[in-house]
Image (cartoon, rainbow, N blue to C red):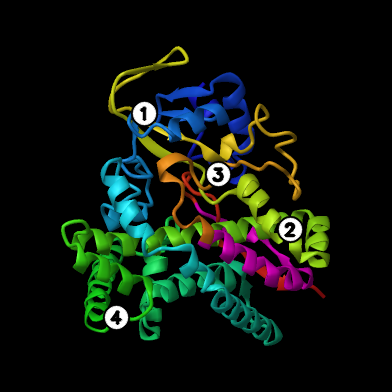
């Protein structure tokens, strides 16, 4: 029964999890997996409720909740990450500090630069196509765009970009399988050392970037922001900021190919792109769910959750819940309201939400002009083989004849 209801590691589940989620919502919305030793929460009402109760459902065990697979996640090699693994009051303290630097004004100022990066990537992609070289939406656009943006935001100099590419690949969830464990730990060490060097350089020669701003805060109020927290936040922004935006772009691009009428609609009216991004977040969000740890024995809707049980709150399933969304299996650009849970809820609502939305909107302002001339080949691609996330790590594309 367990395998039928929740075959989490089955390739069929990873390729098409929605029917399994629907069955869980109908038959076992609070499901204890004997096979994997955690609760699976799939209905909107419950996911929303659990996400808003950090006092009962702690984030301390990390987004993967200690989940172990053949391909270890970035979480295994990178170590503790601040905020995402903190609960209040520590979480409140750190979020308040980081919010003073990671402002909406700072993100808005990046808009023209993000557009310039996207322009260059599209130009490079077109040139590769003209030369008859192999194209891959993941490698040629969806991955390098957020890498360059996060590097720019943090203030990481251009000479580090090749190293950044290596960190991104070696520590990426699912992608890391092509690297040995030693290479991945080397990447972690190198990332820590390099970011520490950059932090020190910003201390001596501050600029207008995010690291400089955080260094200033740390130096002004050292007791409030410890050096390891500053380094941890840079790592968190690097890993979370890259992986999720990349996944959103690849997932949404596949939707456009599967539903060409939507692509045509966007091409004719780019003002709809922000709404398209919101519906893409709901329909094919980059994170299937995150784990929480039960802090005390709790009875919830007739189920007894024990202290230290792990709970997987499934945002992606909640976003398809028929009890909350009308026609959830349909992609409706004009959906309103669209209160999806893809960016979290409560104290852990994604701090980078505005940046992710901006990057995705600019990405599709460029892609809707280009994609009609190309065909994506998802059947030759490769999905992230880790069930916590949803996205592609290989997505070939060819020019239409």
Q: Earlier in the sequence, mark 2 or mark 4?
A: 4
**Which of the marked residues, 3 or 1, is nearer the chain's N terminus?**
3
Near-viewer residue (391 or 323): 323
Would you name the residue on which mark 4 appears? 206
The kind of secondary structure the magenta stretch mainly shows is helix
Residue linked to disc 3: 14
Instruction: Give the residues drawn in magenta, as a range.
Output: 355-384
Say whether residue 343 is magenta: no
For the point 36% across and 34% down, the residue is 54
The picture places residue 395, in percent across and down from the top left corner, at 61, 63
Mark 4–mark 1 distance (CA, rounded to whole Å) = 48 Å
Residue at x-position 70% and y-position 64%: 376
Q: Crowdedness of circle 1 by 10 Å Cα count: few (<14), some, many (20+)?
A: few
Residue 77: where, in percent of width, then height? 28, 56
The crowding category of the residue bearing disc 3, from other C-alpha atoms within 10 Å (few below 14, some 14 to 19, many at least 20), is: some
Compared to residue 45, the image places residue 167 above or below, namely: below
């Amino acid at each position: 029964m367990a395998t039928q209801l929740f075959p989490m590691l089955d390739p069929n589940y990873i390729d098409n999890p929605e029917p399994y989620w629907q069955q869980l919502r109908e038959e076992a919305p609070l499901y204890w997996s004997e096979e994997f030793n955690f609760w699976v929460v799939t209905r909107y009402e419950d996911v929303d409720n659990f996400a808003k109760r950090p006092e009962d459902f702690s984030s301390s065990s990390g987004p993967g909740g200690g989940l172990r697979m053949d391909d270890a996640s970035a979480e295994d090699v990178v170590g503790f990450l601040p905020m995402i693994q903190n609960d209040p009051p520590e979480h409140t303290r750190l979020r308040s500090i980081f919010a003073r630097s990671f402002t909406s004004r700072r993100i808005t100022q990046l808009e023209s630069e993000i557009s310039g990066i996207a322009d260059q990537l599209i130009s490079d992609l077109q040139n590769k196509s003209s030369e008859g070289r192999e194209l891959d939406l993941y490698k040629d656009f969806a991955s390098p765009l957020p890498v360059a943006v996060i590097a720019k935001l943090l203030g990481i100099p251009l000479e580090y970009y090749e190293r950044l590419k290596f960190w991104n690949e070696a520590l990426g969830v699912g992608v890391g399988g092509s690297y040995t464990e030693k290479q991945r730990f080397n990447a972690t060490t190198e990332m820590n050392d390099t970011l520490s060097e950059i932090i020190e350089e910003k201390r001596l020669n501050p600029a207008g970037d995010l690291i400089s701003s955080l260094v200033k805060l740390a130096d002004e109020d050292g007791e409030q922001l410890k050096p390891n927290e500053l380094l941890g936040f840079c790592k968190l922004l690097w890993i979370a900021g890259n992986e999720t935006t990349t996944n959103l772009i690849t997932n949404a691009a596949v939707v456009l190919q599967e539903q060409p009428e939507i692509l045509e609609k966007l091409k004719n009216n780019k003002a709809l792109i922000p709404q398209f991004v919101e519906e893409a977040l709901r329909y094919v969000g980059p994170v299937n769910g995150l784990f929480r740890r039960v802090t005390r024995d709790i009875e919830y809707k007739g189920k007894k959750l024990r202290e230290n049980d792990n709970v997987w709150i499934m945002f992606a399933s909640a976003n398809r819940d028929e009890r909350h969304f009308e026609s959830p299996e349909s992609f409706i650009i004009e959906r309103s309201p669209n209160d999806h849970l893809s960016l979290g809820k409560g104290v852990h609502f994604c701090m980078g939400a505005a940046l992710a939305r901006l990057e995705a909107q600019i990405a599709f302002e460029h892609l809707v002009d280009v994609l009609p001339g190309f065909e994506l080949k998802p059947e030759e691609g490769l999905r992230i083989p880790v069930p916590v996330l949803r996205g592609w790590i290989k997505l070939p594309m060819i020019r239409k004849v």
